[in-house]
Image: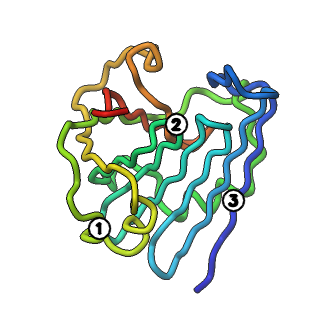
Amino acid sequence: VKWTNIDHGYAGSVNENNQGNDGGNSHQNVNINNQDHIANINSYNGWKGWAAVWDYSKELFATRLFNKRACIVAKMNKDAFPSLEKLSKFKDQKVRAKDTPPPPFLRFSITKTRVRNVAQFGRSIGNLCKGVPTYYAQQDQGEHFSLLFESQGCIDAGILGLFGIYLCGNISGC
């Protein structure tokens, strides 16, 4: 299995809520498995960090939110998500958030419906979400959303400088 590694570190120019963490840097790592059509994304931002699996063959993505001790699973809109090829090309770019326009984004609403069996989503997502409460999310329709997502209980779980995913809503029991 061939993995492509994309490693992006950003200095204080990234607009992220890093309150309560030491330093102002966020770091993301993307690993691509072209054979299985899967991208693994890790965002290292202290307790606000997260890990995600984008499974292009199953058209699903999942994000494990460390500070919520929960996992979110949603249907992937393949027309909106960047392709594995685009992710691979992105690794060669040196991007600073202040030098680029805001990336395209999607917003998802977390439902109150808990997933009973994470293994149904395959090994990669099953392993990511195993052992923590897992919920479904649905993509919000419409093109106009407030950019104040964090004040609306939203978590940015996208790739810095390339693509935004906002997971919005309260997670039961967290």
Quarter location, residue 58: bottom left
Quadrant, the C terminus: top left
Q: Could you tell me how far apart the alpha carbons at marks 3 and 2 are, in whole angstroms?
A: 24 Å
Q: Residues within 10 Å of mark 3 (few under 14, many from 20)?
A: some
Quickly name the residue at label 2: 67
Please, is residue 173 above or below residue 28 in the view?
A: above
Amino acid type at circle 1 is Phe
Residue nearest the observer in this picture, 134 or 34: 134
Task: Tell me where residue 33 appears, x and y as whole percent.
Answer: 54, 74
Amino acid type at circle 3 is Ile
Residue drawn at x 22%, y 54% is: 115
Among numbered discs 3 and 2, the one appearing first in the sequence: 3
Quickly name the residue at label 3: 6
Residue drawn at x 56%, y 27% is: 102
On the rendered structure, is 78 left or right of 7?
left
Among numbered discs 2 and 1, the one appearing first in the sequence: 2
Quarter location, residue 92: bottom right
Quickly name the residue at label 1: 121
Q: Residues within 10 Å of mark 2 (few under 14, many from 20)?
A: few
Q: Label 1, secondary structure: give it.
A: helix
Amino acid type at circle 2 is Asn
The label shown at residue 20 is none
Tell me, what colour scheme is on the image? rainbow
On the rendered structure, is 133 left or right of 43?
left
Please, is residue 16 above or below residue 112 in the view?
A: above
Among numbered discs 3 and 1, the one appearing first in the sequence: 3
Q: Residue furthest bottom?
A: 1
Q: Residue furthest left?
A: 113
Q: Residues within 10 Å of mark 1 (few under 14, many from 20)?
A: some
Of badges 3 and 1, the one in the foreground is 1
Please, is residue 108 above or below residue 145 in the view?
A: below
Task: Tell me where residue 2 appears, x and y as whole percent.
Answer: 62, 82
